[in-house]
Every structure is written in structure tokens, then in C-alpha cells.
Image (cartoon, rainbow, N blue to C red):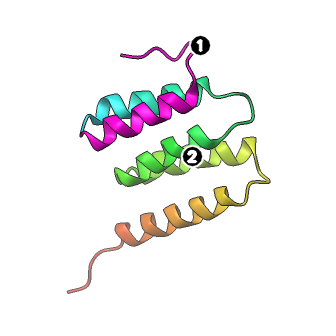
């Protein structure tokens, strides 16, 4: 396993994507988190990658929590509220009961 200390967050993000595409989901989640932890101050890309990972796993509450954290760090990035709105919309639609 790769340690986040001193590691490049971009490389960790690539490794996390590899783990995810290989079906190694526990390692993917941990590595996305390591990438977010290793990212330079003010950088929200790795956080958004973690949030997107949670959304792909249908863990919308976790996705929104992480994306809102990114928004608090870099509120002027217009891609963040778009991602939040998309995730919220999907979350709301999936929570509704299906009509017969």
C-alpha cells in the first residue's frame, strides 16, 4: 500500500482510480482519501474525486459532505456547486419510491 506522507496527491488519485476500476473498492476509497489528505492547501480536486467516488457508489450523503467541504475551501470554483446540485438531484430521485 502507498503511504500518503510525502506522496504526490495526483499520483495517489491515479492509483485510486486504478483500484476502483479493478474492483478493489476498499483500497480505492482509502487511496482517494490519502490523495485528499496529501493535497496542497487550497487544492480541492482530490476532495472532489473522493466525493465523486462516493456518488458512484451511491453513498450520496458522504458525497455531499465531502463536496460541501470542498466548497468551504474554494467557494469560487463554479464546478463544485454544479457537482453538488447533480449529486443532490440524483440522491433525491433515488430516494423516491418508484411508481407502478
Could you say where residue 13 lies in the image, as x and y percent from the top left? 49, 35
Residue 85 image label: none
Is 51 on the left-hand or right-hand side of 82?
left
Relative to 54, residue 15 above or below: above
Could you say where residue 39 lies in the image, as x and y percent from the top left? 63, 28
Of residues 16 and 95, the one drawn nearer to the viewer in this rendering: 16
Asked which quadrant contains residue 29, the reply is top left
- Dot 1: element: loop
> Is-magenta flag for residue 13?
yes
Q: Which circle, 1 or 2, is nearer the viewer?
A: 1
Of residues 62 and 19, the one drawn nearer to the viewer in this rendering: 19
Rendered-image quadrant of the C terminus: bottom left
Q: Tell me what residue is drawn at x 66 percent, y 59 percent.
A: 79
Q: Tell me what residue is drawn at x 60 percent, y 23 percent.
A: 38
The magenta segment is: 1-22
Relative to 6, residue 98 above or below: below
For disc 1, the marked residue is 6
Asked which quadrant contains residue 98, the reply is bottom left
Is 35 on the left-hand or right-hand side of 70?
left
Q: Tell me what residue is drawn at x 39 percent, y 49 percent.
A: 59
Is 32 on the left-hand or right-hand side of 23?
right
Q: How far apart are marks 1 and 2 (CA)?
A: 21 Å
Rendered-image quadrant of the N terminus: top left
Of residues 82 and 35, the one drawn nearer to the viewer in this rendering: 35
For disc 2, the marked residue is 48
Sequence-first tag of 1 and 2: 1
What is the crowding at mark 1: few (fewer than 14 residues within 10 Å), some, or many (at least 20)? few
> Is-magenta flag for residue 3?
yes
Amino acid at each position: 500500500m502507498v503511504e500518503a506522507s510525502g506522496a504526490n496527491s495526483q499520483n495517489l488519485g491515479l492509483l485510486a482510480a486504478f483500484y476502483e476500476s479493478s474492483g478493489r473498492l476498499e483500497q480505492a476509497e482509502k487511496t482517494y482519501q490519502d490523495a485528499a489528505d496529501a493535497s496542497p492547501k487550497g487544492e480541492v480536486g482530490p476532495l472532489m474525486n473522493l466525493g465523486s467516488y462516493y456518488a458512484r457508489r451511491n453513498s450520496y450523503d458522504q458525497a455531499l459532505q465531502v463536496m460541501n467541504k470542498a466548497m468551504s475551501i474554494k467557494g469560487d470554483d463554479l464546478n463544485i456547486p454544479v457537482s453538488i446540485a447533480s449529486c443532490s438531484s440524483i440522491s433525491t430521485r433515488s430516494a423516491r419510491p418508484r411508481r407502478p
